[in-house]
Image: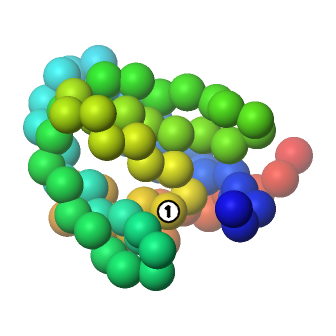
Amino acid sequence: MNSYVQVSCDLYDMFEEAVSKNVNCEITFLKEKKEVTVTSKIVDIRNVNNSEFMETVDGTVIRLDKIVEFNGIPTDAVNYYIPA
């Protein structure tokens, strides 16, 4: 698996807000170098072996740094991680 690239706090906050509001989200992410889009509620965000993942209500698990678009917003527009 590729090295995990931490996502920005702003992007992470968008994901957390979607969890707390319990709303359907359109998530486009890279899977085996192809873009895949799912529409589902996010039920969990967790850290596993220093990589962050979200899980949707239908059981899809997505690594956060593989998400390229979230609810119609390209993630590169808000993903500007600056190491401490």
**Percent position of residue 8, x then y:** 60, 51
Packing grade of label 1 (10 A; few <14, some 14-19, many >=20) is: some
SS under mark 1 = helix
Q: Is residue 42 above or below residue 4?
A: above
- Residue 3: quadrant of the picture: bottom right
- Residue 59: quadrant of the picture: top left
**Percent position of residue 77, x then y:** 44, 70
**Percent position of residue 42, x then y:** 28, 32
Report the residue at 68% width, 43% height from top: 51
Q: Is residue 79 above or below residue 30?
A: above
Q: State the residue position of label 1.
A: 66
- Residue 61: quadrant of the picture: top left
Q: Is residue 37 left or right of residue 16?
A: left
**Percent position of residue 9, x then y:** 58, 42
Quarter of the image that includes the N terminus: bottom right
Report the residue at 71% width, 66% height from top: 2
Does the image show residue 84? yes
Which residue ends up furthest to the right in the rendered image? 84
- Which residue type does callout 1 highlight? Lys
